[in-house]
Amino acid sequence: YKIKNLLKDLDKTSDSYLLTGGTDLALEVTKKRKNSLSQIQSLKRFAKGLQKPINMIELDDIPLDIAVETLADHSEIKIKLDLRSLDNLGVSVDTPVTCKLRSTSTLSVLNLLLRTIDPSLTWIPTTKELVITTLDVAENNLVKQTYKTSRFARRSADPKLTQLETIEAIVSTVDPLSWEEVGGTAIIREMKNGDITVMQTAKNHVKIWGLISNIEAAN
């Protein structure tokens, strides 16, 4: 899948919020919406670097901060370590990293490194940089995105079924333990017009778009 396609859809998406409960809730919703838009805009800027191919990378017990610096130099993206959150997780800048990959991308290497060190590590895009942080932090900075699944659902004899099957495919394959149905914070909702609205981390949105692209190609 291509990150650029995800970003194209993100740019076209307009969110609307039903504000009830007074000014405090309205301000909170506005703040979250601005955060979503900020992460979307940052992903757009970082897309080229994240997709940048890597013919071969070999890291052998390299300190985490040096490994991150190597990736940052290659991708031309500023990558920052959230030291406080990593420290709370018991991860330090000196944590040794070992990785050997061929014919891959910056994004794939980054995801593999974090998964190898600790499954609770992830990344979020900010205005100026990618920040390596924890899932707890990422889950407090969820991105809202509406996926235009109606464009291929209409091709089916039963669009409603296609929409529900797409939702099931997403929640069962993209970070299954992150969804609210099993106690997580991520939210997915079906819309009457056949589209799907999702609140997820930026990293998981990239996975969702790849999955939806494959489903659309198969329809």
Image (tube, rainbow, N blue to C red):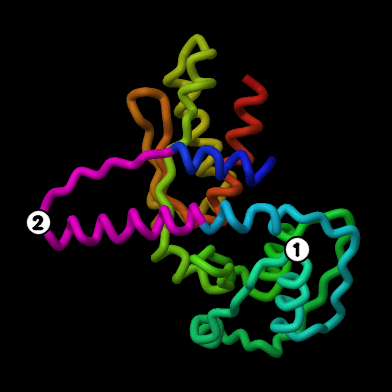
Please indicate whether residue 140 sits to the left or right of residue 119 in the image: left
Q: Give x and y (percent) for residue 117.
A: 68, 75
Residue wearing tag 2? 22
Tag count in the figure?
2
* Residue at image coords 74%, 60%: 106
* Residue identifier under label 1: 109
Left or right, 75 with respect to 160, comes to: right
What is the x, y in percent for residue 21? 10, 54
| SS assignment at label 1 | helix
Q: Residues within 10 Å of mark 1 (few under 14, many from 20)?
A: some
Residue for point 29% across, 61% down: 31
Q: Is residue 110 magenta?
A: no
In the image, what residue type sits under mark 2? Gly
Depth check: give the residue in front, 42 or 145. Answer: 42
Using the rendered view, name the quadrant where residue 35 is placed.
Answer: bottom left
Please state which of residues 149 and 159 is positioned toward the viewer in this rendering.
149
Q: Which residues are magenta?
A: 13-41
Residue plotted at (68% across, 42% down): 2
Front-lying residue, 124 or 172: 124
Image check: 7 left or right of 158? right
Using the image as rendered, state which of residue 3 and residue 168 is in the foreground: 3
Asked whether the viewer can see residue 184, the reply is no
